[in-house]
Image (tube, rainbow, N blue to C red):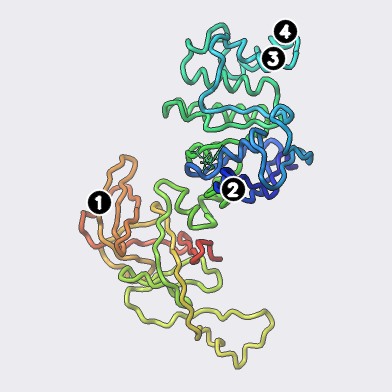
C-alpha cells in the first residue's frame, strides 16, 4: 500500500520564475526506503519539504494513507525530519534532547524515560545520555538527532543529506547503521542525497531527479542495468556510462572515424559494430503487423529500403569495454586514441579520445600507452541505444 503519494505535484518559487518541482507523481510504499538522488538544485529538498509540510505545493496533491495532507502544517502530519546540521539544543543533555518531542506532546516523564532508553540503546548511545551536544563527536551527534526523530514513532521518516557532515569512514558506518535501523523499525523513509553510493547502498528504490522532475524511479540494480534516459545513464556509475554520438540510418549507426554499428531493428537497444568502412547492406527483419501477408512486400527480403536519419547515442559502461591494439576481425570495435591512463589501485582508468570525445575504459592493468591507436570492444548485451530525445530505444 502506498503510504505517501504525490499526485501531479509542482512547486514554483519567485512568482513562478523558479520551478523547483514539476508534476511529480510518486508512490512510496509502507516500510519502503526511498531515496531522492540528483545534482544540486534539482529539487530534492523541496520534494522532501513538501512531504514534510514545510512547503505547500503550487499544484497537485499529497496523500498519506489515502488521506489528503497538503495544506496541513508539519505538526499535523506526524513526520520526523533529520537535517544535515542535526539542530540539537546545546543547553540540553542528550537524554533531554531526545525526550524533548515527547515532552512537548505531554507524555509523562516515566514513559518518556522508557522510550528515550529504548532508542538510545537502538542507536548505541546509551553511554552518552548525560552529556551535552558539545561534548559529542559528529557521529554521536548524528545518532542523537536520529534518536530524537524516531522516538515519537513518526509515520514517515524524512532525512535530508544527514551524513554529509561526517568523514568518509564514519559516513559508511552510519549508512549501514541507518539501513539496519530502518529494517528493524520498518519505518517508511524518504532520504535525500546527491551521493550516488549512499543512494544505491541504502535504497529500496531511487528516484533520480533532474530539473524538478523524476527521470527514473527504480531499484538501484535496475537503474544501473537499464537507465531509461541518456541523462540517467550519464549520472549513474563511477565513472558513468560512455555515450558515443552517432547518426542512425535504418539499421546502422555511423560513428564517424570510430566505426559503424549495426543495430538490431527489432530490439534496437543492442549494437553490433561492423568493421570500419564496411559498406555492407544491413539485413533486418521488416517491421509489419502480425498476420500481414508479406508477398510482394518490398521489405520481404529483409532489406530496409527507406532512408531515415536520426542522431543517436550508443552507450557502453567503462567496465564493459575491453581495449585492444589490434583491430578485431569480428564483433564490436570502436577506434580511438589513448589520451591518459589513471592508475587507481583497484583498476586502471584509461581515457580514450574517440572522435574528439573522451571516454573511459576500466582495465585491471593497462597494457597500452598514451598515443596508441586502440579498439574498444564490447559485447552486444552491454550496449544501449538512446534516441535524439535521450530515451532508451527498445
Ligand atoms: P541541493 O542538493 O543543492 O540541496 P536540491 O536538489 O535539494 O539542491 P532544492 O533545494 O529543492 O534543490 O532547490 C530546487 C530549486 O528551487 C533551486 O533552483 C533553488 O534555488 C530553488 N528554491 C528552493 N527553495 C527556494 C525558496 N525558498 N525560494 C526560492 N527558490 C527556492
The Cα–Cα distance between marks 3 and 4, rounded to whole angstroms, is: 10 Å
- Give me the residue at 57% from left, 11% from top: 94
Above or below 295: residue 58 = above
Residue 257 to residue 62: above or below: below
The mark lying in front, picked from 3 and 4, is 4
User: Dot 2, crowdedness within 10 Å: few (<14), some or many (≥20)?
Assistant: few
Which class describes the residues within 10 Å of circle 1: few (<14), some (14-19), or many (20+)?
Answer: some
Q: Work out how far the residue at label 2 is from the one at label 3, CA to CA, in angstroms.
A: 45 Å
Question: From the Cβ of disc 4, is ligand 1 less than 8 Å away?
Answer: no
Pointer 1: what residue? Answer: 340
At numbered mark 2, what does the secondary structure look like: helix, strand or loop? helix
**First of labels 2, 1 by sequence position:** 2
Q: Which residue is mark 4?
A: 109
Q: Which residue is mark 3?
A: 115
The x and y percentages for residue 119 are: 64, 17
Task: Decide which of tag 4 and tag 1 comes sooner along the chain.
Answer: 4
Gap between marks 1 and 3 measured at Cα:
57 Å
Q: Nearer the viewer, residue 69 or 206?
A: 69
Sequence order check, earlier mark of 2 and 4: 2
Distance from mark 3 CB to nearest ligand 1 atom below 8 Å: no
> Callout 1: helix, strand or loop?
strand
The tag on residue 112 is none
Quadrant into which the C terminus falls? bottom right
Q: Residue furthest bottom?
A: 296
Residue at mark 2:
16
Q: Is residue 11 above or below residue 245?
A: above
Amino acid at each position: 500500500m502506498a503510504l505517501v503519494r504525490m499526485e501531479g505535484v509542482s512547486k514554483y518559487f519567485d512568482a513562478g520564475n523558479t520551478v523547483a518541482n514539476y508534476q511529480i507523481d510518486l508512490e512510496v510504499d509502507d516500510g519502503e526506503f526511498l531515496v531522492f538522488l540528483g545534482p544540486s538544485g534539482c529539487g530534492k529538498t523541496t520534494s522532501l519539504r513538501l512531504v514534510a509540510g514545510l512547503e505547500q505545493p503550487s499544484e497537485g496533491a499529497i496523500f498519506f494513507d489515502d488521506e489528503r495532507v497538503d495544506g496541513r502544517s508539519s505538526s499535523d502530519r506526524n513526520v520526523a525530519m533529520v537535517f544535515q546540521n542535526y539542530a540539537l539544543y546545546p543547553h540540553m543533555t542528550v537524554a533531554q534532547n531526545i525526550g524533548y518531542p515527547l515532552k512537548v506532546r505531554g507524555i509523562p516523564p516515566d514513559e518518556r524515560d522508557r522510550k528515550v532508553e529504548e532508542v538510545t540503546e537502538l542507536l548505541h548511545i546509551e553511554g552518552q545520555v548525560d552529556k551535552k551536544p558539545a561534548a559529542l563527536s559528529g557521529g554521536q551527534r548524528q545518532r542523537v538527532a536520529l534518536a530524537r526523530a524516531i522516538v515519537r514513532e513518526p509515520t514517515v521518516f524524512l532525512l535530508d543529506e544527514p551524513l554529509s557532515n561526517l568523514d568518509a569512514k564514519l559516513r559508511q558506518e552510519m549508512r549501514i547503521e541507518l539501513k539496519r535501523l530502518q529494517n528493524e523499525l520498518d519505518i517508511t523513509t524518504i532520504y535525500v542525497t546527491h551521493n550516488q553510493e549512499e543512494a544505491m547502498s541504502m535504497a529500496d528504490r531511487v528516484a533520480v531527479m533532474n530539473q524538478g522532475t523524476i527521470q527514473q524511479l527504480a531499484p538501484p540494480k535496475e537503474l544501473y542495468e537499464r537507465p531509461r534516459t541518456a541523462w540517467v545513464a550519464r549520472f549513474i556509475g563511477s565513472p558513468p556510462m560512455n555515450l558515443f554520438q552517432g547518426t542512425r540510418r535504418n539499421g546502422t549507426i555511423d560513428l564517424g572515424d570510430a566505426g559503424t554499428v549495426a543495430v538490431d531493428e527489432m530490439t534496437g537497444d543492442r549494437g553490433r559494430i561492423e568493421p570500419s568502412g564496411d559498406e555492407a547492406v544491413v539485413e533486418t527483419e521488416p517491421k509489419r503487423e502480425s498476420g500481414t501477408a508479406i508477398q510482394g512486400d518490398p521489405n520481404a527480403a529483409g532489406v530496409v529500403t527507406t532512408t531515415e536519419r536520426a542522431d543517436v547515442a550508443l552507450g557502453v559502461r567503462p567496465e564493459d569495454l575491453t581495449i585492444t591494439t589490434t583491430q578485431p576481425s569480428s564483433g564490436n570495435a570502436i577506434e580511438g586514441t589513448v589520451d591518459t591512463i589513471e592508475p587507481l589501485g583497484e583498476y586502471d582508468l584509461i581515457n580514450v579520445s574517440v572522435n574528439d570525445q573522451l571516454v573511459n575504459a576500466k582495465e585491471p592493468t593497462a597494457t597500452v600507452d598514451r598515443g596508441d591507436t586502440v579498439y574498444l570492444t564490447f559485447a552486444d548485451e552491454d550496449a544501449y541505444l538512446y534516441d535524439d530525445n535521450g530515451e532508451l530505444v527498445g
